[in-house]
Every structure is written in C-alpha cells, then in structure tokens.
Image: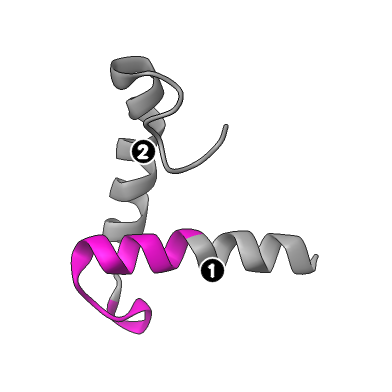
Amino acid sequence: MTNRVVASLRSLRQIATEAERAIEQLTVKQVVTWFVKDGKIPTEQGTDAAFLDL
C-alpha cells in the first residue's frame, strides 16, 4: 500500500511541476490529460521517453 502512495505522489509532483502549480491546485482534468499524454509517449517517442515505466 505504501508503494502505491509513493508512486502516486511521484506522478502528482511531476504533473504539478509541468503545470507550474501546487499539487493541491491540480484538477482531475489536468491529471487525466497528463496520464493520457504520458501513456502515448512510448508509442510516439520510444519507451525511455515516458515518465511512467509501464
């Protein structure tokens, strides 16, 4: 369970950094959009380019 929390926090920190906002200010739409974008990166740019290791 702790690993999931830490992994989620890591992603949220990255999203907040890219959005130039505090984690608390992120919207659901911003988070979902980021995950969709990051999920497409391995297909478009190669597996090493994505933030998440899927």
For image coordinates 31% across by 69% down, the residue present is 16
Describe residue 42's horizontal placement relative to residue 17 as left or right: right
Q: Nearer the viewer, residue 32 or 17?
A: 17
SS class of the residue under badge 1?
helix
For image coordinates 37% across by 61% down, the residue present is 14
Position in image of residue 3 (x %, y %): 74, 62
SS class of the residue under badge 2?
helix
| In the image, farthest residue toward the front | 48
Which quadrant of the rendered structure holds the C terminus? top right
Q: Is residue 16 above or below residue 36?
A: below
Position in image of residue 45 (x %, y %): 30, 20
Distance of mark 1 from mark 2, alpha carbons? 16 Å
Residue 30, by quadrant, is bottom left
Residue 28, by quadrant, is bottom left
Total marks shown come to 2
Residues in magenta?
11-25
Mark 1 residue type:
Leu
Which quadrant of the rendered structure holds the N terminus? bottom right
How is the structure coloured here?
one colour
Mark 2 residue type:
Asp
Which residue position is annotated with label 2?
38
Q: Nearer the viewer, residue 29 or 38?
A: 38
Position in image of residue 26 (x %, y %): 30, 72
Q: Residues within 10 Å of mark 2 (few under 14, many from 20)?
A: some
For image coordinates 28% across by 58% down, the residue present is 29
For image coordinates 55% across by 36% down, the residue present is 53
Q: What mark, if any, has residue 35 been given in the picture?
A: none
Q: Is residue 40 above or below residue 1?
A: above
Q: Is residue 24 magenta?
A: yes
Q: Residues within 10 Å of mark 1 (few under 14, many from 20)?
A: few
Labels 1 and 2: the sequence-earlier one: 1
Which residue position is annotated with label 1?
9
